[in-house]
Image: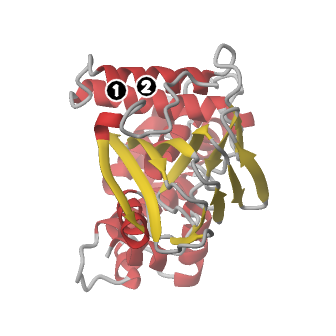
Amino acid sequence: MFVANQSRCTDTGPLARYRVFHTSDAAEARDRVAGIYCPHELRITGPDRNRVDTSMSHVRVGNVSVNRLLYGPEVNIDVGYLGSFALVMMPMTGSAEVTCGDQRIRTSAATAAVISPTLPFFQTIEAGCDQIMIQVDRDAIERTCAQHLGHDLRQPLQFAVDLDMSDHRSQGWPALVSYLLAMIDGDAIPLSAPLLATSFEHMVVATLLYAQPHNHSDELRQAPRSIAPGHVKRVEEFISEHAGEPLTVASLATYAGVSASALYAGFRNFRQTTPMAHLRNVRLQKVHDDLRQAGSGSAITVTDVAFKWGFAHLSHFTAHYKRKFGELPSDTLRKHA
């Protein structure tokens, strides 16, 4: 398992000086945890269902946060879907029964749980279970995975739930967690420095992608492909900069200075997609970004944004969006409005 000072008292041990709250009120505990993670249902299984002994520590570095959470009594937590982030839950003491999608495991100091953003998630945390939790923004981890693959993800990233923490010498993730906790608690490195924050984030994301099995693991572990020809890269850059304009295969081929068949072959052989499918994925990402940036009280609608980025057939657009992001565009808008 990862190395940590396993004190059951959150006044000492890992992340103790980063504690953000301690409360005996169940409603406050639920709301404070939701403010860091996401809304959820919290039910206490003991005789007093209004009282807890909950403490939480929280350190955010870029698109990653490192947390420590102890509820006190046994609790049931129904999240639904995390949606915007993946979560790795690692008990230092105690255990929890975790259900994610169709997988169910019991966590302990030797077995952590990895919760995927697009799978339903429910857990029962036993009394006294003291956990380290690492939260990774979904956009960051899927973007990194796509960069390593060399093409956009065709399915949302979904991890195996159980993660072996029993031998930090052979398992990259436990060793990384021990290092991160030592680095944060030692305060020897200023994590607020942009360069260090970026390195911290990439180390966490890349290690999780390669250490934990998921639905893109086999492809990710294949030998790197040959470098894509220049005309493919030029077209990708052009699409990124001009995604809101009317583009066709002919116009893209003309811009690249190659035939349409050569352009198709380049995308098929080096990106495992087509130029127009790549354009669609870029536009879907633009829609996703616009919906996430919609402020409270905004009059923006999904239809407006879809039309803005060239999606005239809303049913087809919705199907492609859900396949790429694991949720409906209306869900994205509602969560960020």
Q: Which residue is mark 1?
A: 184
User: How far is mark 1 from mark 2, CA to CA?
Assistant: 6 Å
Q: What type is the residue that disc 2 sits on? A: Leu
* Whole-percent x, y for residue 129 in the image: 58, 47
Taking depth in this image into account, of 247 and 45 the one nearest to the observer is: 45
* Whole-percent x, y for residue 121 in the image: 64, 63
* Residue for point 49% across, 38% down: 144
Q: Which residue is mark 2?
A: 180
* Whole-percent x, y for residue 49 in the image: 53, 74
Q: In which quadrant is the N terminus drawn?
A: top right
Q: In which quadrant is the C terminus drawn?
A: bottom left
Single out the residue that lies furthest toward the front: 47
Tell me if residue 136 can be seen: no
* Residue for point 71% across, 25% down: 166
Quick check: 14 above or below 3?
below
Is 151 left, or right, of 303 in this rendering? Answer: right
Sort mark 1 into few (<14), some (14-19) or many (20+) by Cα contacts within 10 Å: some
Q: What type is the residue that disc 1 sits on? A: Ile
Taking depth in this image into account, of 323 and 197 the one nearest to the observer is: 197
Sort mark 2 into few (<14), some (14-19) or many (20+) by Cα contacts within 10 Å: some
Taking depth in this image into account, of 271 and 101 the one nearest to the observer is: 101
The local secondary structure at tag 2 comes to helix
* Whole-percent x, y for residue 290 in the image: 32, 67
Using the image, tell me which numbered label, if any, was put on residue 255.
none
* Residue for point 42% across, 31% down: 14
> Is there a contact, CB below 8 Å, between mark 1 and mark 2?
yes
